[in-house]
Image: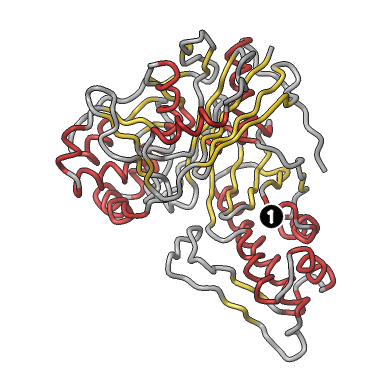
Amino acid sequence: MHVAGIDSSTQSTKVVVCDATTGAIVREGRAPHPDGTEVAPAKWRDALHEATRNGLLDDVDSIGIAGQQHGLVALDAHGIPVRDALLWNDTRSAQAAADLVDELGAATWARRTGSVPLASFTVAKLRWVARHEPELAQRIRTVLLPHDWLGYQLTNRMATDRGDASGTGYWSPQHDRWDSDLLAHAFGRAIQLPTLLGPQEPLGRTADDVLVSAGTGDNMAAALGLGIGVGDVVVSIGTSGTVFGATDKPTADPTGAVAGFADATGRFLPLVCTLNAARVLTATAAMLAVDLSELDRLALSAPPGAEGLALLPYLDGERTPNLPDATGTLSGMTRGNMTPANVARAAVEGMLRGLDAGLDALRDNGVPISRVLLIGGGARSLAVREIAPMIFGVPVTVPPPAEYVALGAARQAAWALTGELPTWHARAE
């Protein structure tokens, strides 16, 4: 039996076809998405068709879909989008998020949804549309997330899972259901919401009679693809950094540092996001006029602590802590320590300390941390691999590079197909 996992991310659609029993990848496909922070949902469908051309799905028995979180897909009474989808990285809803927090209080939002609204959250985007596009808002009858919309295209059914639902800002982790009152407060009236599916509950079948699983958000799928358990925390070093772990109980952080998401298995997935991650390394390499491999060599040639040189790496502002207008600072400079090696070391240590602040935020919210799984483009750095255990203070495992979001979607597809969540083993360093 073969299963397919679809990762419909901000930048592209990636598809992996796997053996349902072992998880071994049989073949893959991909296609790009348009740039920008708002996209016509039909472009995702077109990208999926492009990524699966030439019979990629011909012998597939089940499909799972993972999608970028938070995106607003607003549909009219006929199921047609009333406007382009607003993506998670569209920041025009920042003031709307701040207004919602002021109106009800951060503690209320954290208690009722597990999270405090940010510009990225669907609830803030709904408020923005209601205030700035009232004529379009009047036409909205239901709201889907990106993965829900693709599932709707394949099965003609509007449904979602608790993992992706937990990123909307109007799902209750305590009651495992929509908080329709919060949505009505934000939008000004009630609207229809997709059915909530259980972790292994199928969404439906395609016109070709292929099973489609519930699907989930991208971070939830990555956790499923990595097979994390309680005590495992994933640190993903990409353009931004994410730090998330599995727990049996929901979190509710009124500071807003920790988003109290659900996972794709029935547990919870508290998550911290930082703005400054791998780009700290690329910016430092550019400043020193070296490539990334030479940056690694320089950093590992310097002593821990870089002889007192320290980089506060808020080069793009920061989200954790919430300092959007902050800038970076290189401090502790002396004539003796201002060497390329120490600057490289300070950059690696500074970036990792920013991610370590995310680990501390999880600990403060009762999340157990026994090991870190290091993934993302930044995990390829030899300096990052060697220095991370010193900064994090726990064992660090580096899984092999893979499309873990797509693999997680495929694993969910196998679960829906067979009724059992398969164990797929991967080598790790």
Query: Is residue 334 depicted above or below 374 in this figure?
Result: below
> What amino acid type should be assigned to the residue bearing mark 1?
Gly
- Image quarter where the N terminus lies is top right
Coloured how? Answer: secondary structure
* Left or right: 260, with 179 as reference point: right
Q: Which residue is mark 1?
A: 378
Query: Is residue 413 depicted above or below 252 in this figure?
Result: above
Q: Residue furthest top?
A: 209
Picture residue at 40% right of the left edge, 48% below the top: 120
Picture residue at 56% right of the left edge, 52% below the top: 361
Q: Which one is nearer the viewer's eye here, 8 or 340?
A: 8
Q: Position of residue 244 (x, y in %)?
A: 59, 43
Q: Position of residue 115 (x, y in %)?
A: 42, 43
Picture residue at 75% right of the left edge, 73% below the top: 305
Which quarter of the picture shows residue 335?
bottom right
Picture residue at 82% right of the left edge, 67% below the top: 297
Q: Residue furthest right?
A: 301
Q: Position of residue 149 (x, y in %)?
A: 40, 28
- Image quarter where the C terminus lies is top right
* Left or right: 339, with 97 as reference point: right
